[in-house]
């Protein structure tokens, strides 16, 4: 355990605000900080979060536009070819259903609508399908659109950009060193290349991690530093929800306090970026969920891809009780 006084954490936060880039050693000291210093660490994290995002919280909503039937062997995923989880499997939702989802996102007070599809990579026809829906959503709402469709060709990324897609999500998921333990059907480098290609197309890159998949503290820090190097604008921080029927079934490595330290570390390493508390927050942070927003500035509302999320009213209440404010989305 690393022990620092509240003044020391605050001083580091002030240095970060002034432009200091947190070192490996400093990031590791956050992850390994003494539990008794948690509140002072979160206060310092909030100094940084408040500097760039005030008290606003961004809400995001996912639609699972194509479920299951994926040829990849990602060990955490209920939709992968190696999963035996009893999930609903279906081909692409209609354009009308995808557009309906956008209006549901608005009803849930989300400002970003995330269109997600299982699979290794989309066909050109599937890209056209998504682009048509996105164009109509963009014409009728002020929603920001994020897509997560797998690996992309350059022409496909360009097509999505032209349709009005703001962001493209492609998570690193775990560290380069741990990657082979989680999936073998593609590489860490494949994911990095996709993120770089998205940036080249003019779409904002969204890339994050899943904590709790056997990574060491050093590897957790490596993930945060890799995202800083990639200059990801939005960083979803997932915490493993070990779904029955997946290869990682039964794995429980995280505590609520450890999750908060990891979020604080991510904020210190990536001070100006959207840090989103994402999948698994309900089962890993549990009663400490509100504290996460002192480091993070964004959450998902509603369900995830194949697992249930917290009721939207509880999320709204949590934000209000903290004295925070939902970032507005308008028609």
Image: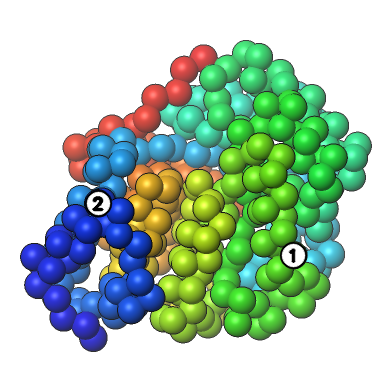
Secondary structure under tag 1 reads: helix
For residue 18, the mark is 2
Left or right position of 180 against 258: right
**Residue picked out by circle 1:** 190
Is residue 123 found left or right of 193 in the rendered image? right
Residue mark closest to the camera, 1 vs 2? 2
Query: The N terminus appears in which quarter of the rendering?
Result: bottom left
Residue name at image x 35 percent, y 53 percent: 271
Of callouts 1 and 2, the N-terminal one: 2
Instruction: Estimate how packed mark 2 is, as few (under 14), some (14 to 19) or many (20 or more) residues with alpha carbons within 10 Å.
Output: few
Q: Nearer the viewer, residue 236 or 76?
A: 236
Q: Residue at x 82, y 53 (%)?
A: 121
Residue 125: x, y in percent?
91, 37
Question: x, y (%) of residue 123?
Answer: 89, 45
As drawn, the label of residue 113 is: none
Answer above or below: position of 17 versus 72: above
């Amino acid at each position: 355990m690393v022990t620092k006084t509240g003044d020391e954490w605050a001083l580091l936060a002030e240095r970060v605000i002034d432009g200091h880039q947190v070192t490996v050693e400093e990031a590791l000291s956050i992850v390994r900080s003494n539990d008794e210093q948690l509140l002072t660490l979160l206060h310092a994290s909030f100094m940084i979060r408040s500097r760039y995002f005030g008290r606003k919280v961004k809400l995001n909503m996912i639609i699972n536009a194509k479920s299951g039937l994926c040829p990849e062997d990602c060990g955490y995923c209920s939709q992968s070819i190696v999963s035996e989880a009893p999930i609903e499997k279906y081909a692409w939702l209609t354009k009308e259903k995808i557009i309906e989802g956008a209006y549901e996102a608005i009803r849930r007070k989300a400002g970003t609508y995330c269109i997600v599809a299982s699979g290794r990579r989309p066909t050109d026809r599937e890209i056209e399908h998504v682009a048509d829906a996105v164009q109509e959503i963009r014409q009728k709402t002020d929603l920001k659109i994020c897509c997560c469709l797998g690996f992309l060709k350059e022409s496909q990324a360009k097509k999505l950009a032209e349709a009005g897609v703001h962001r493209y999500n492609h998570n690193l998921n775990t560290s380069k060193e741990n990657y082979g333990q989680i999936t073998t059907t593609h590489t860490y480098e494949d994911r990095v290349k996709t993120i770089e290609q998205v940036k080249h197309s003019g779409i904002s890159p969204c890339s994050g991690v899943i904590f709790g998949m056997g990574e060491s503290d050093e590897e957790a820090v490596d993930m945060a530093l890799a995202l800083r190097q990639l200059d990801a604008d939005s960083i979803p921080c997932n915490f493993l929800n070990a779904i029955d029927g997946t290869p990682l079934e039964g794995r429980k490595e995280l505590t609520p306090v450890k999750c908060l330290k990891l979020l604080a570390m991510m904020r210190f390493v990536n001070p100006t970026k959207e840090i989103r508390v994402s999948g698994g927050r309900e089962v890993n942070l549990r009663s400490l969920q509100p504290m996460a927003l002192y480091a993070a500035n964004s959450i998902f509302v509603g369900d995830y891809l194949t697992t249930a999320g917290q009721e939207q009213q509880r999320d709204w209440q949590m934000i209000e009780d903290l004295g925070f404010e939902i970032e507005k989305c308008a028609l």
